[in-house]
Amino acid sequence: MFKVTRGYVLAATLTEEKKNEEMKYPVYSSQTKDNGLMGYYKDYLYEDAITWTTDGANAGTVNFRAGKFYCTNVCGVLLSDKIQANKMISEALNNVAKGYVSYVGNPKLMNNVMADISIMLPKHSEEREQLSKLFTNLDHLITLHQRKDVFLCKQKVFIDLTNCPHSWEQRKLGEVYQKIRNAFVGTATPYYVKDGHFYLESNNVKDGQINRNSEIFINDEFYEKQKDNWLHTNDIVMVQSGHVGHTAVIPENLDNTAAHALIIIANPSEEICPHFVNYQFQAPEAKIGIDNITTGNTIKHILASEMKKFDIQVPSYEEQRYISEFLLHLDHLITLHQREKTFNIMEE
């Protein structure tokens, strides 16, 4: 599909750190910091092409370079007049290229090796372009999210209280939730049936979401007995024992659902956006905090009374809602991306 070539030697002293009228073309090197940007130069070599790092610690890192650019001799380049280079093709290559790097001495991925790599691509250019737009938009959202510096969900938390447009407070979970309690005390096993009311168990709560890969059902008698303990829309549930600390927000379609004894339920007050709190629980720092208040050696567990003492960060409701909607939208894009079966990212 591509002609395989590479960039040319360029001394860093000949580049400018910032773009100006004369030095306007980006120069890419072997680094991954700032997307490999080394600076700006007066001339360009290529336009709308795919590059990869040929040598060093980042060997095998692949990127699509939109527009006119210069790249150094440690960048391989893919050029073609047969197929349009785009973000989708670079992502497909980036998923497999590391597996072709030679780690004998200085890591290398040379031109002849890159030329023989096989990847799966959609046959139609329209589909390749749609996937490319998806990946580009996703990268853009992630960049905006990082610049927001509120918190990077699921990977790390970073809260910059000085730059937020509204003040943030540290509050106890018990202060902002009307009630934090166990679902009930006892066992529901004698009331299990093949077809009845869905019964939320601890293994249905994982990584901030409700999953129904495995389902238990209870009969009418037990379901009605638990009426005072039913889950309601926007409640936050937390696993109390075993996989301690996994949380999720109850969606509308699970309103009035009964829950297992190993589930802790928190009813939010009007000043709290439940998804905002749920995202905080997904951060590593929160998981460390939960570990510090768990008990037990073989099987870990946590008490509802201890959860009331857990610290969370609380900005204005407006900012909570804004952040939550942004992250929910990002999760939605990731889910759509995972469902796309055109090619198997991360595995093939």
Image (tube, rainbow, N blue to C red):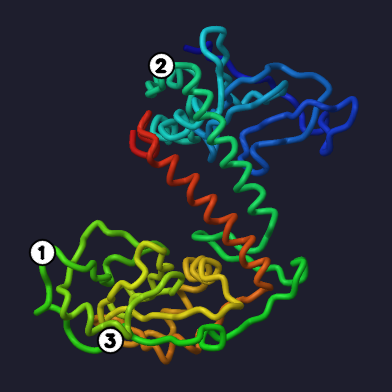
Asked if residue 53 can be seen in this view, the reply is: no
Residue 346: image location, x then y, percent: 38, 39
Q: Camera-side residue: 71 or 295?
A: 295
Which secondary structure lies at badge 3? loop
Nearest to viewer (mark 2 / mark 3): 3
x 41%, y 79%: residue: 291
Give the mark nearer the N terminus: 1 vs 3.
Answer: 3
Q: Camera-side residue: 75 or 253?
A: 253
Which secondary structure lies at badge 2? loop
Q: Is residue 311 above or below residue 2?
A: below
Nearest to viewer (mark 1 / mark 2): 1
Q: Is residue 69 above or below residue 268?
A: above
> What whole-number distance in Å separates the C-alpha atoms at marks 2 and 3?
55 Å
> What whole-number distance in Å separates the C-alpha atoms at marks 1 and 2?
45 Å
Q: Is residue 282 above or below residue 74?
A: below
> What whole-number distance in Å separates the C-alpha atoms at marks 1 and 3?
22 Å
Quarter residue 263 falls in:
bottom left
Residue located farthest toward the right when viewing the structure as drawn: 21
Give the mark nearer the N terminus: 2 vs 3.
Answer: 2
| Residue that carries the numbered disc 2 in the rendered image | 123
341 relative to 145 in the view: left or right: left
Residue 40: image location, x then y, percent: 79, 31
Give the mark nearer the N terminus: 1 vs 2.
Answer: 2
| Residue that carries the numbered disc 3 in the rendered image | 184
x 44%, y 80%: residue: 266
156 relative to 198 in the view: left or right: right
Quick one: quadrant of the C terminus?
top left
Dots 2, 3 in contact, CB < 8 A: no
The amino acid on which the numbered mark 2 sits, given as a three-letter code, is: Lys
| Image disc number at residue 194 | 1
x 53%, y 31%: residue: 62
| Image disc number at residue 74 | none
